[in-house]
């Protein structure tokens, strides 16, 4: 080991999980996994969805008991029965979905469960605030202890989560997909925070499937695939492609192949659109946007800047307050979802389980959700089951949906295959405009490849594609043009080939208006 | 004129009191995340138990000073009993909290009438408690000979108790360890659980407090405002209490103002219906006023206020 940061102590193992096996019935989620974390390092745990990362971390945090195997913390064998035991041994976890109480203040959230009290069970908020200020200064994690959680940004909320663990004396921090909700700049800050913490002797377990972050932040990386440990590597000695290959088990193609194409006529035109959210606040304000045939227009932005309301207004799920939405000069403003669909818009919705599929319907029923009234699926009020089944079989074959059985319930499919059902259905409509919102969320690398290819195929067929995603890498590799949305407005449109992550990140945070 | 205002003032406090007990009960239960529409049933069983036990204790021990207090306490415990059923159904067995609450609302009056019929015979009305065995009026001697002040402030002890409970509840909910945990459990039970707080225990305690207070609310009707229990005594006041709690944005002080608003409408109804005013409006129409105000309030304001985030959602440990 020629290069390693000086504060990593290779003589001290803080976590030593040995031959951990966890079975759920016949299913082996973790198969004899070893995980070693040294003091002062950032250790990445890399694996696809369903590889067993979460199971392993839940075992470490006391939420599951392992079927077999032993856990040593700082050389001592421990039996972690519940999260309280884990906390007692200095393990803190920052969950992917924050465990914060929104109407409470930062300080209240941090002290909850181990509240400092004066006599008569009265909360000592003065001491709580002083305590929070002290640790926040010690670790360089600035927060305002008096601010309410609902009023602070997502990255601030993440700091609160980290402080919560530190306040309980955590020596080992588990960060579960911490960058999923952050802008590129915030990710940089987080990586800096992680470095600060390891310098002070803390160890960090970083769960992720983003290779770039592992390269930037981690010292060692343990790769698991289908419940088995594949390898533990020193990050500085390996590149992203090798990591990806180990994670997936085959070579992965990150570059999306796109033929050169000149965009055609305007398909979607949005003029001065204003949309209100459920609270009556205008989250989309006088927004202008066009999408042309033969291009993928990507909308980049941090979650909650009006993306949801914009798409709902286009697809007819939400009333536009003012403005116009035209598809090929045909006005679809405030038309019903069916009229919008008939005008040539298909939609891959953000929440595939809630809005894309009826989970308790079969695959073949899901295949005709939009077209069930039409021939050949329906004749004189009666569904033509044979035609529907044949149609579904064809799509299952064409889109490689597994398992190859149209009678399965949509619920029983994996996330990737659920998404394939939706894509098969939507693309077969042959729409003028295909809208895709977060189409690869929660999918593994193989499925992501497929989704990206499907979107680019539409573009190559001279159709228009509107892609909304919070993943900058996705936006940059799939789109032709990128529109950045910030506080309900498009603050800039750039050429995907010419822009940089920095430039986009700045615009996403509201700075650098171009 | 001054007399009229004093009358309305005093009556307002008198009629706001049972509502406020119920509403404070709701505040505790719902801040912990358990919807309690069973307040009506809990108030009914409390009203019956308070009046019935006071009467029985009077027969057994004579007119001792502690008798009404014991009756008052038993009323609270009876509310607790129904609350325990609600808690077991909603917390341990994760039943639908609204359905369970409806069941409680049938169970409360049913049980009261059944027991009333068994013990005292007839249709479930309890015998009248003599005046000296009702809850005390603490300022009775001081205010003697001062008709105006007396009309306003010579209230039963239950009135003074409930208005001090507003402050005490606020202190408990917002200034103590217990309170912050209770509210945490109602907002984000999983977060509380990961911090080592026992969600089920907190919710049980909150629902039991809710039952106890509702029971006292019932007794403040049957042992103070009037002196016996009858099946029509509570007649929807539990629901008005619930509306007051929602109108008061799930906060003790908010619930208090809402209850005073409802109290004032009842006082006005009584005032306008009295022969001295001589309005020619049917008393049946007048007695609709509090309920109509409830409807208007619920339609107009409730949509905009939202309660604790996890209110009404059963908590299941280990569920993702």
Image (cartoon, coloured by chain):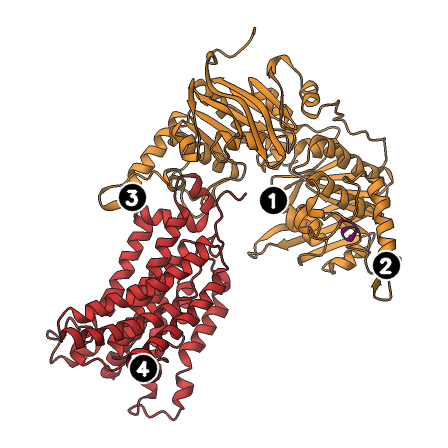
Chain colours: A orange, B red
Spatial CA span between label 4 and label 3: 47 Å
> Which residue corresponds to mark 1?
A305
Residue A362 locus on image (x, y percent): 75, 51
Spatial CA span between label 1 and label 2: 44 Å
> Which residue corresponds to mark 3?
A123
Tell me, yes or no, whether dots 3 and 1 are on the same chain.
Answer: yes
> Is B4 on the left or on the right of B146, as rendered?
right
> Which residue corresponds to mark 4?
B125
Residue A502, placed above or below residue B196? above
Q: Quadrant of residue A395?
A: top right
Kindly indicate whether the residue at mark 4 contacts the one at mark 1 (C-beta within 8 angstroms): no
Residue B131 locus on image (x, y percent): 18, 80
Q: Residues within 10 Å of mark 3 (few under 14, many from 20)?
A: many
> Which residue corresponds to mark 2?
A384
Chain letter, disc 1 residue: A
Chain letter, disc 2 residue: A
Sequence-wise, the earlier of marks 3 and 1 is: 3
């Amino acid at each position: 080991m020629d290069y390693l940061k000086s504060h990593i102590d290779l003589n001290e193992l803080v976590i030593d999980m040995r031959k951990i096996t966890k079975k759920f019935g016949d299913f082996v989620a973790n198969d004899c996994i070893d995980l070693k974390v040294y003091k002062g390092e950032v250790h990445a745990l890399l694996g696809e969805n369903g590889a067993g990362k979460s199971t392993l971390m839940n075992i470490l945090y006391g939420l599951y008991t392992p079927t077999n195997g032993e856990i040593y913390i700082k050389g001592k064998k421990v039996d972690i029965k519940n999260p309280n035991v884990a906390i007692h041994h200095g393990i803190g976890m920052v969950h992917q979905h924050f465990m914060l109480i929104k109407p409470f203040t930062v300080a209240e959230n941090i002290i909850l469960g181990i509240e400092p009290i004066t006599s008569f069970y009265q909360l000592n908020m003065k001491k709580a605030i002083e305590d929070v200020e002290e640790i926040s200064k010690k670790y360089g994690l600035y927060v305002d202890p008096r601010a309410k959680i609902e009023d602070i940004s997502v990255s601030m909320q993440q700091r609160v989560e980290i402080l919560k663990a530190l306040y309980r004396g955590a020596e080992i921090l588990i960060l579960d997909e911490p960058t999923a909700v952050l802008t590129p700049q915030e990710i940089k800050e987080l990586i800096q925070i992680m470095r600060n913490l390891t310098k002070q002797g803390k160890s960090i377990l970083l769960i992720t499937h983003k290779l770039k972050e592992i390269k930037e932040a981690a010292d060692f990386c343990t790769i698991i695939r289908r419940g088995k440990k594949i390898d533990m590597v020193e990050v500085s000695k390996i590149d992203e492609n090798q990591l990806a290959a180990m994670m997936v088990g085959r070579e992965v193609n990150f570059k999306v192949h796109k033929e050169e194409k000149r965009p055609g006529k305007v398909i979607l035109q949005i003029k001065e659109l204003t949309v209100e959210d459920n609270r009556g606040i205008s989250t989309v304000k006088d927004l202008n946007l066009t999408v042309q045939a033969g291009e993928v227009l990507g909308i980049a932005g941090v979650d909650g800047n009006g993306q949801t309301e914009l798409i709902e207004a286009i697809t007819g799920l939400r009333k536009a307050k003012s403005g116009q939405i035209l598809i090929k000069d045909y006005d679809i403003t405030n038309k019903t979802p069916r009229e919008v669909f008939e005008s040539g818009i298909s939609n891959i919705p953000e929440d595939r389980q809630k809005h894309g599929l009826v989970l308790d319907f079969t695959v073949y029923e899901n295949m005709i959700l939009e077209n069930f009234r039409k021939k050949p699926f329906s004749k004189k009020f009666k569904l033509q089951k044979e035609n529907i089944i044949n149609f579904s079989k064809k799509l299952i074959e064409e889109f490689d949906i597994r398992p190859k059985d149209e009678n399965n319930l949509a619920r029983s499919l994996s996330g990737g295959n659920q998404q394939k059902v939706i894509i098969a259905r939507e693309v077969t409509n042959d729409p003028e405009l295909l809208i895709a919102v977060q189409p690869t969320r929660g999918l593994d690398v193989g499925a992501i490849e497929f989704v990206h290819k499907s979107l680019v195929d539409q573009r190559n067929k001279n159709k228009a594609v509107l892609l909304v995603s919070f993943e900058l890498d996705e936006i940059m590799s799939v789109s032709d043009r990128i529109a950045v949305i910030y506080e309900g407005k498009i603050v800039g449109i750039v050429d995907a080939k010419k822009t940089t992550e920095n430039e986009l990140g700045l615009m996403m945070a509201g700075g650098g208006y171009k | 004129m001054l007399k009229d205002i004093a009358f309305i003032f005093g009556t307002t406090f008198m009629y706001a009191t049972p509502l406020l007990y119920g509403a404070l009960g709701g505040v505790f239960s719902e801040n912990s995340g358990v919807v309690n529409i069973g307040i009506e049933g809990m108030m009914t069983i409390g009203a019956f138990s308070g009046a019935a036990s006071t009467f029985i204790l009077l027969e057994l021990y004579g007119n001792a000073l502690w008798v009404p207090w014991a009756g008052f306490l038993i009323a609270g415990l009876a509310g607790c009993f129904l609350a325990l059923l609600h808690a077991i159904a909603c917390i341990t067995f994760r039943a639908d909290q609204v359905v369970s609450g409806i069941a409680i609302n049938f169970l409360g009056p049913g049980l009261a009438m059944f027991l009333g019929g068994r013990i005292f015979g007839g249709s479930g009305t309890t015998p009248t408690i003599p005046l000296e065995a009702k809850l005390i009026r603490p300022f009775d001697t001081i205010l003697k000979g001062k008709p105006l002040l007396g009309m306003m402030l010579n209230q039963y002890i239950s009135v003074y108790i409930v208005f001090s409970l507003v402050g005490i509840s606020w202190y408990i909910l917002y200034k103590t360890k217990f309170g912050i945990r209770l509210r945490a459990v109602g907002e984000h039970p999983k977060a509380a659980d990961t911090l080592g707080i026992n969600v089920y225990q907190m919710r049980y305690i909150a629902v039991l407090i809710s039952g106890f207070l509702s029971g006292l609310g019932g007794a403040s009707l049957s042992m103070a405002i009037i002196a016996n229990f009858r099946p029509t005594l509570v007649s929807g006041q539990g629901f008005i209490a619930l509306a007051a709690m929602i109108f008061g944005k799930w906060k003790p002080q908010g619930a208090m103002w809402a209850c005073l608003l409802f109290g004032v409408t009842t006082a006005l109804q009584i005032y306008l219906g009295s022969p001295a005013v001589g309005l020619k409006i049917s008393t049946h129409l007048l007695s609709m006023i509090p309920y109509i105000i409830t409807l208007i309030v619920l339609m107009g304001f409730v949509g905009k206020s939202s309660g604790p985030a996890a209110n009404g959602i059963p908590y299941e440990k280990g569920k993702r």
